[in-house]
Image (spheres, rainbow, N blue to C red):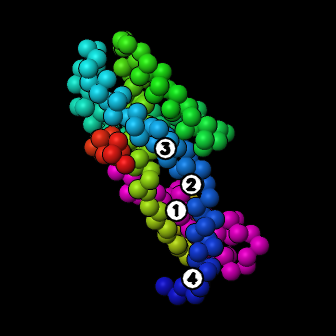
Amino acid sequence: QGADLSIPQLSQMAGRALQPILPPLRRLQAMACGDSEKYAPQLLQKLQEAPEAGSVLDELKDAVGNPERLEMALGKELQRARGATDAAVVEQQEREALKLLSLSKWKARQVEEAKCWLLRFLVGRAAFQAKVLFNFMQESRHERTNQSLAEQRFLRASELLPDEGWTTGWWVRATLVGMELNIDEIERSSSE
């Protein structure tokens, strides 16, 4: 539609649109780094052996397929990790796993903590598979259309790159895609 921007200009817009997405993505990835890969199968096995656990795999699969529960769990985790370094998030995840693994008997609280830990791990593994989809739109003469773009998470390129005159009239959006949670990642990670 008459797009006269060069590849470097589009790349520059995309890079700026990506900036707010990268720190939370790194935090998610940190939840599946370090020794977490070896602790995940051990936690799952111990969780399956706990009498209070019930049908652990079914519950984890349900949580993985339940966006509201997942969003609630992740929202708390990302808030907790805000301001922490990636290394601190990795260390915290490892400490929590070791604490749970060191207990000889789990009560209902530890069962829930282990489920949350495994969900964080699965989301972290999925974050490594994330892809970014960029959308570029030219500004409309109709303010209602521009308002709709803003509601759809588009950002004005001129606000992202205020010193670049060529950005006037352009909108950009970055969306994470491809983060599919798979319960089999727990076993797969232990062989890496």
Whole-number angstrom distance, CA of label 3 to CA of label 4: 34 Å
Residue at image coords 54%, 38% = 90
Residue 110 versus residue 157 in the image, above or below: above
User: Of the residues shown, which amino acid type is indicated by label 4?
Assistant: Ile
Which callout, 2 or 3, points to the residue nearer the camera? Answer: 3
> Residue 54 location in percent, x, y?
24, 20
Whole-number angstrom distance, CA of label 1 to CA of label 3: 25 Å
Q: Which mark is residue 7?
A: 4
User: Of the residues shown, which amino acid type is indicated by label 2?
Assistant: Ile
As drawn, the residue found furthest toward the front would be 191
Image-quadrant location for residue 113: top left
Per the image, the residue denoted by label 1 is 174
Residue 87 versus residue 176 in the image, above or below: above
The one of 69 and 90 positioned closer to us in this rendering: 90
Whole-number angstrom distance, CA of label 2 to CA of label 4: 21 Å
Image-quadrant location for residue 185: top left
Per the image, the residue denoted by label 3 is 33
| Mark closest to the chain's N terminus, 2 or 3 | 2
Read off the magenta span.
151-180
